[in-house]
Image (tube, helix red, strand yellow):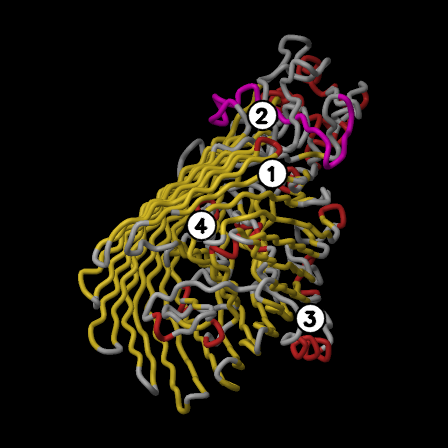
Amino acid sequence: MRKFGLGFVLATLGAGVSSGALAQASAQPEGDESAFEAGDVIVTAQKRAQRIEDVPVTVTALSGEHMADIGVSELDEVAAFIPGLQVQEQSANNPGFVIRGITSDSGSAQQGARVTLYYNGVDISRSRGAYQDLYDLARIEVVKGPQATLFGTAAAVGAISIVPAAPEPGFSGELAGSYGNFDRTQVSGFVNAGDEVLAGRIAFAYKYRRGYVRNIAGDPDVPNQNQGRVDQDDLNGQDQRGIRGSLRWQPSDAVTADLVLTYDGQRNPGTAFKSRAHAPTGGQTGDYGYAELSGSPYSEEVLGARKLGLDRNVYDANLTVNVDLADGIRFTTVNGFRHFDALEVFDADGGPAWYLEFAEDAKGEQWSHEGRFSFEGAEYRAAFGWNAFFENGYQRVPFSTEEGTYLACSVAAAYAPVRAQLQAIGIPTGTGCVLPNGTIPATQVTSIVTGGALRELPYASEFSNYGNNDTYSVFADATWIPTPRLELTAGARVLIEDRKSGYSSIQPNSVILAALGIRTSLIGTANTQGAKLTAQRSFAALLPRFNALFRLNDSLNLYGTVSKGRRSPVVQLSAANSAAGVVPNLQLVPEETVWNYEGGIKGRVGPFTGAASVFYQRYKGFQVSVTGEDGVTRTQSAGSADNLGVELEASLAISPVLTLFGSFSYLDGGIADDAANGVYAGNRFRLQPDTTASGGASLRVPVGNWTLYATPTVTYRSKVYFEVPNNEAISQDGYALVNLRAGIETADGRYRIGGFARNLTDEQYLIDAGNTGGGFGIPTYIAGEPRFYGVELGARF
C-alpha cells in the first residue's frame, strides 16, 4: 500500500468541523414531513426518509434547487462538487463513473458494472444506457462505500441515485431558458397539476451547442485537403433532448403509487479524438487546435452513419408502490424497464488518414423487480426483500480502413517487414505515416503494391459481444436501538448470478497480405464468419454490511461502517485461430472483492453544517480494462489494491444573505506494489486525482421588490492518469475551473434574469487520453470545455 500519514488523516478529520465543504440543500422527505425540522437535509439512501446526519454511511445530497443555484445541469458538472466522485463525459455513450478512484465505464455487454447508477430507485448501470440528463430533480444522492443491501450487486464501491421531482397537489410550473456562445441553447421546464388523490407532472429539457473543436474535414475553404470526403460537423458539441411524465396516485393514506416514463436522446456531433502524431492539413496544432476527423468514405455503408457523431435513444419506465400494511410496517415494490440503442461513429486515429475508423452499435434491455418489507419500532428496525434483475444486450463494433494506408500506419510488430519495404522506397510508416503538414504518402501504398491496378482497397470488418445476465438476490437489514443515542445495524445480501456471454466476428483476410502469402485478417482477429459462440457460468456470493451510529447530541453524530463489495466475474468470450480452425477463446476473470472500513462525523453546530470521513479499502482480484492492438477492450485481473482517503464537506451560513460552502477529498490509492501484480504493480487508479476540492459562496441580497443573487464557485482536481499502467504521456496535470452565476429575481422568486460563465479563465485541460487509438499505438486526446458564457431567463407559476 502507498504510505499515507495517519496523523494527517486524523488531523484533517478533526479539522472537518471547521473547514469548508459542500452546501447540501434540503429536499422533501418521502414520509411525514412533521418528523423533520426546517433546514434538515432529508435523504432516502437507506430506503426511508432520514436526516442526512442520521444515516450511518458516507452520503452527499444535492437538491435540484442547489444545482440550479451553482449552475450545473450535467453529471460531470455535479461531480465536481461531491468529494470522492468523478464523472467523465467524453460522450453520452461512454460516461465514466468514478467513486473513490474506482471506475465503471466498460461498454462490453459481457462485463458487470462497478458503480451503480440509480434512476427512480432502479439500477441503470450498464454504461451505454446509464447517461441520464438532469432536469426537474428533487435531488441527487451519492452513497460511498459498498452497501449491498441498499443498492444491489453493482454497488461495489458506491452508488449515484437520481431522484426526479414527484407530482404534488396543486397547479404549478416553471420555464427556464439560456443562450450563450457556441450557440449554447438550453430550455427546460415542468407543469404540475392534480389533487391529493391523483397528480401528474410533465418535465422536459432541450440542450444544444455547436462543437467547440473546429473540424476541417471536407471543408471547401481548406485548400489541398486530404481524401475529399463528406463535410463534417465541428466536434464535442451537444444536441440532446429529454421528457419525463410522472403520475402519482394516492387512493388512501396507506397507498402511494408512482408511475414514471422517461425518454432521453442525443444527436451529438463527433468526439474530438485528436492525435499528437497525425497532423491535420496545415500542420500540427496541438491538443487544443483544430482537427481533421472524417471517418470512412464508406461510413454510411459500413459504420452505419454518414457523419461522425452519436445517435442514442433511451426509454425508461418505472412503477413504485408503497403500502402501509400496519403501524410501522410497509411493503414497497419497485419495478423498472429500460431500453437503449446507441450508434456512435468515431475516428479513432485522430488524424486525416483513412486508417482507424470505427463505430459502436450498442443495444440493450433491462428488467428489474424488487419487493421489500420494512418495520420500524422504538428499539428495532428491520427490512427484508428480494430482487430480480435481467439484462440482455450486445455491443457491435464495425471497422473501416484502406488496406495500404493501414499497413503503412500500423505499428504492430507483425507488419514490421512490410513497413521496412515501404520505407525502403520512401514511404514513411508507423506514427510518421502522416507528414507534419498533414499530407498522407501512405495513400500511395495500394497503387504501388498492385502495380497501379488499384488506387485503394477498402477493408471492412466487425466483431460483436453479447451478454445475457440474470441476477437473483435476497437481502435483509436489522437495526437495534439499545438507547436513543446508539444504533447498530447488520445486514447481508445473498445473490445468484447466471451470466451468458456470446461473441461473433466477420474479419476477412487482407487482400494485400494474401498476395504476399500471409493469410490473416488485417487486425489479426479470428474470423467466426458471423457464427455466434457462447459460454455460460453461474456464480453466488454473500455480501454483508455492519454499521453503527452514535449521537453526540441532537444534531451531531459519529458513525462507522464495515462492508463488503463485489464486481461480478467476467465470462469473457472471444475467438482464436488454431490448427483446427477458429475456436472459442474463453477467459474467466475472477470476481473483484473489496472490504471497506470507514468512520466519520457529521451534523450541525450553529450556522455550520459539515461532515468528515476517513476510509480504508482492500481489494482482491482488482479488474482493469485494456484495449489491444485489435481494438478489443478486455478485462484482466491486476491483483490486489488498496485505497486510503479522507473526505470533507461543509457549509457556513455567515449571515442571512451569505453562505459559504466547499468540499475536499484526498485519496492515496492504487494497485499494490507487489511483484505478483506484474506491470500494474504500484500504479495509481485511472481517472482518479489524489486531491479534489470545490468552494463557493451563495449571495442573496434583497433590494426592494427584487433580490440580487450571485454564486461564484471554483473546483480543483490534481493530476490524473487516464490509463493503467500509468503513462506520463497519457495524463493531465492538476487544474482549477472558475464558474459564476449572477442576476436578479423578483422577491417572490417568480421571475429572474441573469448571466453565467463556466470555465471563466478559459483554462485548457484534457478530459481523456489514450482511447482506442492508444491500443493501436497512436493515443488520442480529448480537450475539455473552453469558456462558456451567456444569459438566462426563468419564470415560475
In the picture as drawn, the residue positioned furthest to the front comes out as 704
The alpha-carbon separation of the residues under discs 3 and 1 comes to 47 Å
Q: Can residue 411 be seen at all in this image of the molecule?
A: yes
Residue bearing the label numbered 4: 126
In the picture as drawn, the residue positioned furthest to the bottom comes out as 483
Name the amino acid, label 1.
Gly
- Label 4 sits on a secondary structure element that is loop
Could you tell me which residue is drawn at 49 percent across and 46 percent down? Answer: 585
- Label 1 sits on a secondary structure element that is strand
Q: Residues within 10 Å of mark 4 (few under 14, many from 20)?
A: many
Along the line of sight, which residue is nearer the eye, 184 or 559? 184
- Residue 407, percent from left and from top: 67, 26
Residue bearing the label numbered 2: 233
The alpha-carbon separation of the residues under discs 2 and 4 comes to 29 Å
Residue bearing the label numbered 1: 790
From the image, state whether disc 4 or disc 1 is nearer to you.
Answer: 1
What type of secondary structure mainly makes up the magenta span?
loop
- Label 3 sits on a secondary structure element that is loop
Of the two numbered discs 3 and 1 on the same chain, state the one appearing first in sequence.
3
Of the two numbered discs 4 and 3 on the same chain, state the one appearing first in sequence.
3
Residue bearing the label numbered 3: 1
Name the amino acid, label 4.
Arg
The magenta segment is: 282-306
Image: 524 above or below 373: above
Q: Quadrant of the N terminus?
A: bottom right
Residue 286 part of the magenta segment: yes
